[in-house]
Amino acid sequence: MLPTNNDAAPVLSVRGLKKSFGSNTVLNGIDLDVPRGKVVALIGPSGSGKTTVLRSLNGLETPDGGTVTVGEVSLDFGGSVTKKQLATLSNRSAMVFQQYNLFPHMSVLQNVIEGPLKVQRRPRAEVIAEAEKLLDRVGLLEKRDAFPFELSGGQQQRVGIVRALALKPQLLLFDEPTSALDPELVGDVLAVIKELADEGWTMVVVTHELVFARQTADEVIFMDGGVVVERGPAQEILRAPKMPRTQLFVQRLLHDI
Amino acid sequence: MTSNWDLITSSLGPIISGAITGTIPLTLASFVLGLFLALVMALMRISTNKVLSTIARLYISVIRGTPLLVQLFVIFYGLPSIGVKLDPWPSAIIAFSLNVGGYAAEVIRAAILSVPKGQWEAAHMIGMPHVQSLVRIILPQAARVSVPPLSNTFISLVKDTSLASLILVTELFRQAQQVAAFSQEFMILYLEAAVVYWVICLVLSSAQSLLEKRLDRYVAH
Ligand SMILES: Nc1ncnc2c1ncn2[C@@H]1O[C@H](COP(=O)(O)OP(=O)(O)OP(=O)(O)O)[C@@H](O)[C@H]1O
Ligand SMILES: [Mg+2]
């Protein structure tokens, strides 16, 4: 199921990523490497630019500078970038949104097969078989004909994950996948993401769930004010952060729990 | 009394035939063309291209700011003086389409803008280009919210087509006028025309509720 590739090169490589909205500099030179099969957790206070990083990787935001490499595709945002190049880059990754963003006028199955069928134009029978297998994995096969409004938040987010997987991306991007969920529904979704990590998917997860990050992530990156303040193995950063800003942030979050 | 009743039953034929061969096809043709025009205008109005959005804004403003009867007369009686002579039917269809185009454009624009931004983003995320996102993801959702206001536009149009009688299109009201002129029974004939319009609109209103129910099947209540 996993797209295979040359093992040595990182799946995602970001250098000097910059983005401003008007006079507001949101990303001020972000570097990021994710080797194949590894999980990076992106943490940081609200407004630090985490979402903007993910959106820049998926073509939802066009950075002002820096290079982004996903798989074999590399783009230098310092120069001019065409729509087509941007599409080639963003098609390497798939995103799971905080608010799920399922298509409300389509059934669960239609949500999942829309991309593979109508964009990637793969054979219908194959696409449906794969979609059903994925839905079964997250325990939602019997909901294949339900509409999103008939599902709980946790179920909708699992469909969101399946929709991303069905695109067969090289890189999975999660933007606070559980922060819109009622507390009792968070566990199921995190369990699915952990399973995908164990299975060898390469991913970047923006999250406030530090326990989850410690258990799942290989590397944790703490961002603040559009720069990376501290990075390292999950255990280190979350147990014994070096920088004062990281210490403060981690302590606050752990107290909230 | 009997002669009144005879008049009603004998005039019902021409009036209904005016509805079937005039009012209804005129309404349908104008509405379909008008909706298409409205969609184009709505997209131009939303577009980031200043020229396109200004053209659309101007068009919508002129259509909404001038009486339909004046629009109709400009096309049928005005255009011949600059060498464009159109028959009553094409004149009527053009005038009503342009009118629907102006009103429905605002409805469609609002409906498109009411679809959350996250839907565009999810569409782009699965790799859809802009136009495909619009057609497969945004417009179906916009359609649901625009059915009630567009149904109102449609029902207004049915009644507005009576203005076409003034440029000699043989439709429901013109048939009633002709029988009335001949029989001199204005009250009876015009009330009869009113009842037929009313019945048509009642039927359309129930069709509207059915359509809304169908489109609502994928949202929570
Ligand atoms: N489209 C936009 N236009 C203008 N400013 C924006 C836009 N998107 C983000 N910003 C600004 O960029 C900054 C970083 O936003 P971003 O959403 O990346 O932060 P975040 O780390 O994801 O925060 P949170 O934890 O609240 O989700 C914020 O100050 C935000 O107001
Ligand atoms: Mg965010």
Image (spheres, coloured by chain):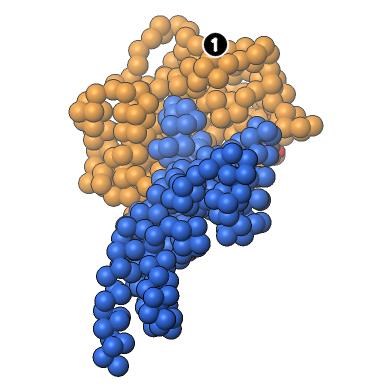
Chain colours: A orange, B blue
* Residue A183 in sight from this viewpoint: no
Instruction: Kindly identify which residue carries mark 1.
Output: A74
Q: Is residue A226 visible?
A: yes
Is A226 placed left or right of B196 in the picture? right
Query: In the image, is residue B198 above or below residue A221?
Result: below
Residue A9 on image: x %, y % = 48, 8
Q: How many marks?
A: 1
Question: Does A241 sit left or right of B217 as displayed?
Answer: right
Mark 1 belongs to chain: A
**Ligand 1 closer than 8 Å to label 1 CB:** no
Quarter in which the N terminus of chain A is drawn = top left
Q: Is residue A4 above or below residue A18?
A: above
Picture residue at 28% right of the left edge, 88% below the top: B3
Q: Residue B163 appears at what percent x and percent y? A: 50, 62
Say what secondary structure mark 1 lies in.
Answer: strand
Out of B78 and B92, give the one closest to the viewer.
B78
Amino acid, disc 1? Ser
Residue at horizontal 59 percent and vertical 26 percent from the top: A56
Closer to the camera in the image, B62 or B89: B89
Relative side of B49 to B39, left or right? right
Rendered position, B57 above or below A82: below
Q: Residue at x 37, y 79 (%)?
A: B183
Residue A29: image location, x then y, percent:
70, 20
